[in-house]
């Protein structure tokens, strides 16, 4: 079978037994270093992908999918008309009004900052991720499953999480104080608004940050607390069948709302500058967590660059090894030059040798990296069993095992970079070999 001469000689040099065993040792170290770097990069990026997916799923589960707000006034009066418009989109499976505000809750001398949500029990079950986790107290004092309807049975009743109740030392039937961000101005001066709320229900979302920072009251009570115009709400939350299509759905709804605004303009003869409807904006869960996902992406890139240093260090070994090979093969290079082999083919011989080392190291690294990445959870469990200690305590960490997702694009990029760096490392030694002068090299042979 025909093989180009530089390829044939380069592969022979790679497989040949060395006079200097140290060169062989450096060759193995180079292959091992590249393999280690590739393996580490695949495992780290796969785990980062897994964490990114885990964060996205938890974010989607706890956050709104889409949200309609009025950027001009900060509140919506005709929210009941917007829900049917939103549900006309196939991806929208639920809609509910809400009032949002900030405040501090006080109980047992402990104060916590909270996000206060006013919800309508009639609609909230369609969109809420905690609808099936509500606990209430029946007439016999026993805890049982409940619904958002409990917020309609008690004026200024509040639903808090089980974690928050434990931290505040309260239970169903107790009272907590809510201090809102609004100010009461009296002859005695300005004082924050305060309201006593009765705990009527508990919930457990399962995400500590969500549980410890959100409370729910009836929509009408929230309107009074935050002094919104009568029958107005902060916005409308939407639940989607496919949350990953939130942007497409938001674009569709934005278009529908703009069309509705234009029809109202024509019908009422209003000037565009006086129209409130056109200021409606549709936001997605991506907008809410944009900073978080940007941070994760930056961390992923940073880890990629740091792990690339392992491959770069291994590549320096390739340079050292090839320089020593060129020195060892000076007489053979001189003979090849004497036989008429041009410098560019001499250069190609040593580029083949270094490139093969990079290729072989990358292949080993890919195999090992994929084996570990696909089985990282089992490996962690084995280590936990071996040391007799749980590495990721569920009560502390929001995950019970390390997630891992292998992307072909990541593997291809990592392998390509390793191969490219190894190829670039061959340029100087190969160029040095091509500059060998036959007469000078053979003078003392």
Image (tube, rainbow, N blue to C red):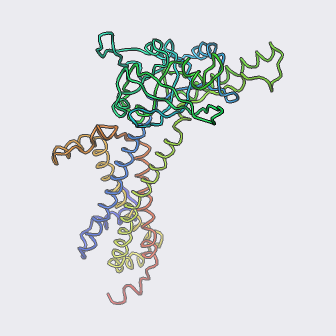
Vertical side of 208 occupied by 301: above or below:
below
- Name the spot of residue 426 as percent of width and height, x first: 42, 67
Vertical side of 100 occupied by 326: above or below:
below
**Residue in the foreground of this view, choosing between 193 and 145:** 193
Quarter containing the C terminus: bottom left
**Residue in the foreground of this view, choosing between 14 and 282:** 282
Residue drawn at the location 39% of the way across and 41% of the way down: 51
Vertical side of 240 occupied by 295: above or below:
below
Quarter containing the N terminus: bottom left
**Residue in the foreground of this view, choosing between 350 and 162:** 162
- Name the spot of residue 119 as percent of width and height, x first: 51, 19
* Image quadrant in which you'd find residue 80: top right
- Residue, far bottom: 444
- Residue, far front: 188
Vertical side of 172 occupied by 371: above or below:
below
**Residue in the foreground of this view, choosing between 407 and 189:** 189
């Amino acid at each position: 079978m025909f093989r180009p001469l530089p390829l044939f000689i380069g592969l022979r040099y790679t497989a040949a037994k060395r006079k200097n065993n140290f060169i062989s040792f450096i060759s193995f170290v180079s292959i091992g270093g590249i393999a280690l770097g590739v393996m580490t990069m695949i495992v780290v990026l796969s785990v980062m992908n897994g964490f990114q997916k885990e964060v996205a799923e938890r974010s989607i589960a706890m956050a709104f999918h889409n949200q309609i707000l009025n950027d001009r006034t900060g509140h919506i009066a005709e929210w009941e008309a917007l829900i049917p418009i939103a549900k006309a989109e196939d991806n929208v499976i639920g809609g509910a009004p809400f009032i949002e505000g900030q405040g501090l809750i006080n109980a047992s001398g402990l104060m916590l900052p909270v996000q206060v949500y006013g919800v309508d029990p009639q609609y909230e079950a369609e969109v809420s991720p905690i609808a099936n986790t509500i606990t209430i107290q029946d007439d016999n004092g026993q805890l049982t499953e409940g619904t958002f309807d409990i917020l309609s049975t008690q004026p200024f009743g509040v639903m808090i999480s089980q974690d928050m109740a434990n931290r505040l030392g309260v239970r169903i039937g107790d009272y907590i104080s809510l201090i809102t961000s609004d100010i009461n101005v009296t002859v005695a001066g300005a004082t924050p608004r305060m309201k006593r709320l009765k705990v009527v229900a508990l919930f457990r979302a399962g995400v500590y940050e969500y549980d410890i920072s959100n409370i729910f009251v009836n929509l009408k009570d929230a309107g009074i607390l935050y002094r919104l115009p009568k029958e107005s709400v902060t916005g409308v939350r939407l639940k989607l069948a496919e949350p990953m299509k939130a942007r497409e759905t938001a674009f569709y709804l934005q278009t529908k709302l703009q069309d509705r605004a234009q029809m109202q303009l024509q019908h009422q003869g209003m000037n565009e500058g006086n129209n409130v409807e056109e200021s409606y904006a549709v936001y997605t869960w991506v907008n809410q967590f944009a900073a978080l996902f940007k941070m994760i992406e930056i961390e992923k890139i940073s880890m990629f660059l740091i792990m690339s240093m392992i491959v770069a260090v291994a590549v320096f070994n390739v340079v050292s090894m090839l320089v020593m090979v060129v020195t060892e093969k000076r007489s053979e290079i001189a003979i090849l030059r004497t036989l008429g082999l041009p410098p560019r083919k001499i250069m190609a011989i040593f580029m083949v040798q270094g490139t093969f080392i990079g290729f072989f190291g990358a292949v080993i690294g890919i195999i090992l990296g994929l084996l570990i990445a696909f089985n990282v959870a089992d490996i962690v469990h084995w280590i936990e069993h071996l040391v007799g200690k749980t590495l990721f305590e569920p009560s502390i960490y929001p995950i019970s095992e390390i997630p891992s997702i292998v992307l072909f694009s990541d593997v291809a990029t990592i392998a390509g970079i390793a191969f490219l760096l190894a190829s670039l490392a061959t340029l100087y030694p190969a160029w040095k070999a091509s500059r060998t002068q036959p007469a000078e090299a053979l003078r003392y042979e």
